[in-house]
Image (cartoon, rainbow, N blue to C red):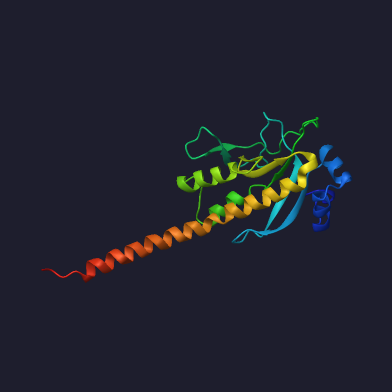
Amino acid sequence: MADERLLLSYQGLLALLAGDAKLRARLLAGDRFQAKTPLTYPGRLGPVVAYVGLAPAESADPGYSAAPVLRATLDSSAGFDREPASPEPPPAEPSADSMIRISDGGGLIKCLSEQGMDLEIDMIMSKTVFHAVKEHEGAGIAAGHVYVDAPPEAVGAGFWRFIQLMGEVMGLRHAKYKDALVQLERRRDADSDTLGRRPS
């Protein structure tokens, strides 16, 4: 069960984004916050929940789930491969160059899968998502979690980049539907051409 002190209300989230000194100090001390955002996943997943805390050390695994999940890799042809993640990321030690990570907790890839866009099967969609994420400063995918890293003094700007990224990737489902409609229309045109021809 989640520690209720770490669940931020909408007002608490706004205070964090506005640069509240006490909340920033708690983040740098190792506290991890989660807060519902105004954004909602399509389908049954409900609101996008943002998880905010110190970014793991470069060598640490940033995963949150013990189940096998997708991990972005530059070596994989699709940008993703399957590996187990550790149950909790090792706590990062605050330093002068500490970064704050804003993550989706794995919801975005789950949402895409529910919408028929399984990134392990659909290589085109997998590459599209991977490159869309990489377009955003400080963004990445690790252990199936989409995230944006930002300096402690710029958590607000990082959060809005995170929201923009989530919206853009969720919007890819419309491209998938459009592609299906284009294919259907082409098939219909081809069928009508075949039916309309008369032997000479």
Question: Which residue is found at the position 59% from the left and 44% from the top?
Answer: 133
Q: Position of residue 131 (x, y in %)?
A: 54, 43
Residue 1 or 82: which is nearer the viewer?
82
User: Which residue is farthest top?
Assistant: 59
Q: Please give left or right for residue 28 compared with residue 177 in the image.
A: right
Is 200 on the left or on the right of 29, as rendered? left
Residue 80 relative to residue 50: left or right: left
Vertical position of residue 173 compared to residue 57: above or below: below
Name the residue: 51% across, 32% down: 75
Position of 82 with respect to 41 (left or right) is left
User: Would residue 122 be seen by someone viewing this image from the given angle?
Assistant: no
- Residue 64: x, y in percent? 68, 41
Q: Nearer the viewer, residue 187 or 136?
A: 136
Task: Work out which quarter of the rendered image holds the C terminus and state it.
Answer: bottom left
139 to 7, vertically: above or below: above
User: Which residue sits at x=59%, y=53%?
Assistant: 168
Q: Give x and y (percent) for residue 162.
A: 68, 48
Outermost residue toward the right in this view: 22
Q: Which residue: 55% across, 53% down?
A: 112
- From the top left corner, tell me how far across and down residue 115 is, in percent: 53, 57
In the rendered image, the vertical position of residue 155 relative to residue 114, given as above or below: above
Let me know if residue 150 appears in the view: yes
Could you say which is closer to the camera, residue 52 or residue 172?
172
